[in-house]
Amino acid sequence: MRPLVLSLLLAVPLSAGTIDVRVQDAHGAAVKDAVVYAVPEGRALPLAKRTAVMDQKNRMFIPHVLVIQTGTSVRFPNSDDIRHHVYSFSPAKPFQLPLYKGTPASPVLFDKPGVVTLGCNIHDQMNAFIIVVDTPYFDRTGGDGHVALRDIEPGRYVVHVWYPDMRDEPRPGNVTISGSERADLSFVIHAHGHP
Amino acid sequence: MAIRSFQTKFLILVIAGLVLLQAGTLVSVHYAGQRTLHRSVDQELRVGARVLERVLETRARQLEDSLRVLALDFAFREAIASADAPTITSVLANHGSRIGADAVVLIGLDGTVTAETANDGLIGKPFPFAALLRTAEDRGEASATVSFRGRPAQVVVVPVLAPRTIAWVCARFEIGERVLTDVKQLTALDVSIWSQPDGAQAEVISTLPSEDRTDLLAKLRGGGAPDMLHLHSGLYMSQLQPLRTGDGSKIESLLQRSVEEARKPFDTLELQIFGLSFIMLLLSVIVAIFFARGVTRPLRTLADAAGQIERGDYSTPVRVTQSDEIGHLGIALNQMRAAIAAREDQIIHQATHDSLTGLPNRTLFFDRLSQSIGESRRSRSAVGMIMMDVDRFKEINDTLGHHFGDQLLIEIGRRLEQTLRQTDTVARLGGDEFAIKFTAPNATFAEEVAQRVSTAFDSPFNLGDVSVDVNSSMGIALFPDHADDADTLMKRADIAMYDAKKNHSGIAIYEAGRDEHSLRRLALMMELRQAIARDELELHFQPKIDVPSEHVAHVEALVRWKHAKHGVMRPDEFIPLAEQSGKIGMITKWVLRKAITQCAQWQRNGVDLAVAVNLSALDLLDAELPTLISGLLAETGLPPSRVVLEITESAIMKDAAHALKVLRDLKKRGVSLAIDDFGTGYSSLAHLKRLPVDELKIDKSFVQNLTESAADDLVIVRSTIELGHNMGLIVIAEGVETQESWAILKRLGCDMAQGYYMSAPLPAEKFAEWFATSPWGSVDKMQNGSPVSLAPQSGERSQG
């Protein structure tokens, strides 16, 4: 994912702004790998015609969390020598790929934003998330719970945070980018297991 | 009732002991059983409670597993994910029925019920068992026992994973009878459970029969469940155990064991023990009977043997088969038997035989006689007996000594035996009395037997250097001619023997009627005792006439017995009886008192008569008599010279020396003495000369028939008168009955005469009458105008 983000950053003009987000839990500890994304308000961005991959290896979905822009197709190659039955009951994209081996012929198009929970019907412990967002501006916090969304075009944005184990989604933050300024936002996540 | 048999006692002892022992065993087994029963049921109940808990837990795990599997079903999850309410409800019902859930609800992640299969009205409300959700969040599943609407149930909560939790599904399983039946099958306990929401009436789920359930409900409403419960079908031991619940509600479980059922094995055991005890008892009794028999049979044999000895049967000895104490007892009994037999033989011999002669005694003779009479009665033959005594045996004994007498008796016995047949019996009855029993067809034969017996005395008895001739008197009596039984036969033979002795005939046969006379005598003897007391005796007086003056001088007092049955009896009829029975003294004294008193009375009336009283030979032996007479004279004031005592010649001769002494004593006291019945005895003149007598009375047998032609009597009377006068005695003739004899006596110079010619004996008043009117009365009888008075000097004249 990192290379993808980097290429996006290179494509935007230099005058673009940056949204700096800090995510911490109820104890003030930094939350790593929290998904942060900024959805532009009042205007729709063109759907991405991209392809992403959700691999299955060693009876695990890899990656565990995949963030994609709406309109992205995801391929589900099976790298194991056993069959998997990938499904999703998530309203954003219910689908299933009945028992298969190798790579299915067609990738799955995610054309609605939302969280899609993936599972394997014959391996209950396998799960993964595909976060479908209506924006190209998304990233995940680093080890310090900090992330900077860069090269953001001017405009108003609603900034969301998602974390797999969070109990409730924190209230989204509103940010307006007019130039190359830098906006700072902070979120507190109440995760399961950290009441 | 006293228990007498050793065997019974022994058996009772054994049985009582065994019964006590076994009763004790049974009782202790019963109580031990009871305790064990209680302990084991208690244990069972505790185990049962744990089993119930474990069963519920296991069921919860199974339900969790089932529900989890169900919740992972793809179609189920797909349906849940469809978000279509009817679809969701139907999939819940469908899948819920697969695992037998009573109700299934779907709970959203926010804890609100979103769908339900039962119409519980929970949709949109918070899930009632929120704690379970939290547990399920932590553990991935949760289950609990809860009370739902008053009914105990198990609820299970698992997440619906897609694959992350998208909802919770909860299934409710009511705890029904099936679960409890499982517990019952495992534990054999009845299980009941009920939840008790406050104020609600408990509904009891139970394995109990419905009647018991009703009872139990009633008991529960009554408050609590005790350890022991009496329900419809019996007594139950119970344990109340609250169940752990997940919702804080109160669910009670009650485990019960029917005491009756639990006791069954104990009852069986007790029955078996009882049966065994009974068999043991039976066996013991049989053994005891055998043992007791072993002891009592020989004892009984000994007792029987002792009984035989007691009955006098000494012939069968005890068979001794044992060598123990009983055997020794048997031997001792045999020795005792022999000793008793020997001694009894000896005693019987002594009791039935005369020790001197060795002949049978009176007892044995009587027995044999009775036996022979019995036999004769049957065979219609005759039995004779001879009663015999030795004449003058006392004299022989006195003269030659007792030893000689004994030897003589032995020899007589021996000779008698020789004269008889084997079947006859000779017995010595006592003293010199022998008896012989023989069988006889008739009286003649009996006399022949007696003759043969008398030959025993034909030759003299030579004993040592003395030889004596001995005679015997024999009386014969026959059965059935003279008597019907042995006793009578012996008496009659005795009477016959006295007849023989009296007649000096040697042998006499009993004459019919002799015995009746004897009986009358015997009766009179008895009655004589009371004659004086009954005032039956009366004194009569017969005058003695002074021959020269032809006037009465003396009177003889003669006693009469006015017997109630036999009329007036003369002295010669009863005086011998009085002498035999020893009553003569009494009578003499009575006569003396009466006669002297009467005579004194006449004296006071001026009638001077002397009174003569007869004395018996026995009276002469009474040393008191002289004193008595003196006493009477002093008492009445009658001069001694007015009393004449008449004594028969034979009376004086019986014990001449003593008689002489008494007569002298009497003579000294001034009374006159007369010899009565002179001429019948054998008194010698020399003897007569020594007697201090004043008068001689010629026996009436010489006087009664005295006529001028009766030469013998005339000679005797004349000689006697002459003899008397020569000896200076007054001679009196009695039995004067005719004028002729009176004339002869007067001619012969007899001093006094007495008899019917002058007067019969008269009672006192009659005599007074006679005295007043008879020419024999006093010449001066009118002297003092009294008809009974007499000239005082008339007696003196007669004396002269």
Image (tube, grey):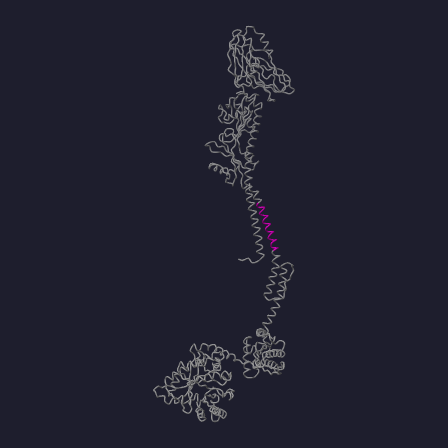
Q: Is residue B436 left or right of residue B571?
A: right
> In the picture shown, does residue B682 fall above or below B21?
below
**Chief secondary structure of the magenta portion:** helix
Horizontal arrangement in the rendering, residue B796 relative to residue B69 (left or right): left
Return the residue nearer the eye: A178 or B752: B752
Can residue B418 be seen here? The reply is yes
Given residues B267 and B342, the one toward you in this image is B342
Residue B136 percent location from the top left of the image: 54, 25
- Where residue A68 sits in the image (x, y, percent)? 57, 13
Above or below — where is B244 with respect to A12? Answer: below
Vertical position of residue B309 compared to residue B69: above or below:
below
Q: Is residue B287 magenta?
A: yes
B31 or A10, nearer to the observer: B31
Give residue B580's position: percent from left, percent from top. Answer: 50, 79
Spot occupied by residue B760 in the image (x, y as percentages of width and height)? 42, 86
Residue lying at the far front of the rendered structure:
B668
Q: Which residues are magenta?
A: B270-291
Front residue of A21 and B596? B596
Q: Is residue B473 visible?
A: no
Above or below, comparing residue B589 to residue B92 in the picture: below
Query: Which of the image's four quarters has the C terminus of chain B?
Result: bottom left
